[in-house]
């Protein structure tokens, strides 16, 4: 498999964790989202993913899959061991809800394209953009902190899609200096996950395109 990735992309980081957890070999194809106005805007990448975002995964069938959660579900359905969703329907919905808080409610407000638009088109100062970023992370993390009971992962003793989404979002929050003292449960889940090789290998600093 080929993963179009950018070391700092938290959405790509989710897929890297899932691939590693399942022990799947893949080739990283780095797509620099910053240089020269973003290599994701080049025609060859646009032909691959018309949304011009990472991650994109070339599956063994040759099909190109986009959107991290869709990719992770594909991996889970095709390579079910270890499962990334609990068997019990209620526990499954709870794991998905945590993943959705991150992937649907925090990340879209804070991803690079949104922040760039605030700066260039809405003419916002860096201070206002940082405040926006912090606000939406804290808003989502407060809900997650109330919902989880680290044991040691988000949903018990098995890693789920909730952890796969949480760890990259915490890494982003740290990079943008969001204070995490109010979120001891989240920090404890992050620490437990990062002890696992799959999470460690997927970290931004361990990617071939890390700067
Ligand atoms: N919902 C998408 C989000 C993908 C996304 O927004 N990726 C960002 C990087 S984290 C991106 O490629 N941005 C393009 C840009 O900054 O121009 C997913 O989960 O895959």
Image (cartoon, helix red, strand yellow):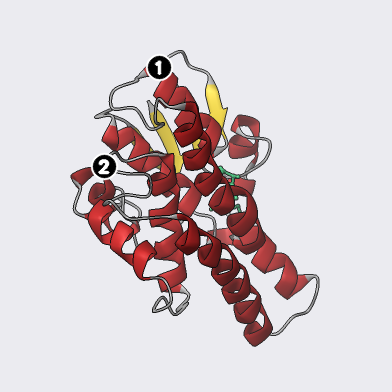
Which residue is rendered at x = 80% and y = 70% of the image?
121
Q: In the figure, is residue 163 to the left or right of 102?
A: left
| Residue on which the image places disc 2 | 157
Q: Is residue 46 above or below residue 9?
A: above
Q: Nearer the viewer, residue 9 or 17?
A: 17
Query: Around disc 2, counting alpha carbons within 10 Å, would you say few (fewer than 14), some (14 to 19), or many (20 or more)?
Result: few
The residue at 29%/63% (across/down) is: 188
Label 1, on which residue?
78
Query: How many angstroms separate mark 1 from mark 2 (CA)?
Result: 23 Å
Q: Where's residue 101, x and y in %?
A: 57, 52
Mark 1 or mark 2, whichever is nearer to me: 2
Residue 77 position by quadrant: top left
Measured as percent of width and height from the top left, residue 13 is found at 41, 48
Residue shown at the point (32%, 31%) measured from the top left: 26
- Quarter the N terminus occupies: top left
Residue ranking furthest to the right: 122
| Residue 154 appears in the figure | yes
> Measured from the top left, where is residue 144 in percent x and y?
49, 59
Mark 1 neighbour density, 10 Å: few (under 14) some (14–19) many (20 or more) = few
Residue 7 lies in what quarter of the image? bottom left
Q: Check the image and name the residue furthest to the top.
A: 61
Instruction: Classify the position of the C terminus by image quarter.
Output: bottom left
Name the residue at 57% across, 46% down. 100
Numbered circle sitting on residue 159: none
Q: Report the front residue among 181 and 120.
A: 181
Depth check, front residue: 177 or 1 = 177
Q: Earlier in the sequence, mark 1 or mark 2?
A: 1
Label 2: element kind: loop
Can the viewer see residue 30?
A: no
Mark 1 secondary-structure assignment: helix
- Residue 10, position in %: x, y? 47, 53
Q: Is mark 1 within 8 Å of ligand 1?
A: no
């Amino acid at each position: 498999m080929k993963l179009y990735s950018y070391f700092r992309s938290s959405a790509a980081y989710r897929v890297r964790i899932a691939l590693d957890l399942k022990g799947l070999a893949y080739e990283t194809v780095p797509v620099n989202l910053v240089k020269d106005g973003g290599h994701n805007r080049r025609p060859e990448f646009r032909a691959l993913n018309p949304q011009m975002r990472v991650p994109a995964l070339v599956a063994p069938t040759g099909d190109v899959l986009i959107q991290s959660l869709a990719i992770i579900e594909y991996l889970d359905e095709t390579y079910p061991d270890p499962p990334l969703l609990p068997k019990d329907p209620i526990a499954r919905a709870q794991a998905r809800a945590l993943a959705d808080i991150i992937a649907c409610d925090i990340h879209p407000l804070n991803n690079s394209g949104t922040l760039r638009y605030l700066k260039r088109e809405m003419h916002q100062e860096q201070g206002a953009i940082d405040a926006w970023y912090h606000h939406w992370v804290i808003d989502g993390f407060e809900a997650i902190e109330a919902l989880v009971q680290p044991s040691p992962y988000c949903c018990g003793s098995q890693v789920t899609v909730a952890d796969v989404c949480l760890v990259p979002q915490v890494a982003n929050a740290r990079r943008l200096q969001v204070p995490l003292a109010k979120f001891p449960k989240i920090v404890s889940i992050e620490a437990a996950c990062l002890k696992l090789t799959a999470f460690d290998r997927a970290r931004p600093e361990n990617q071939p395109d890390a700067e």
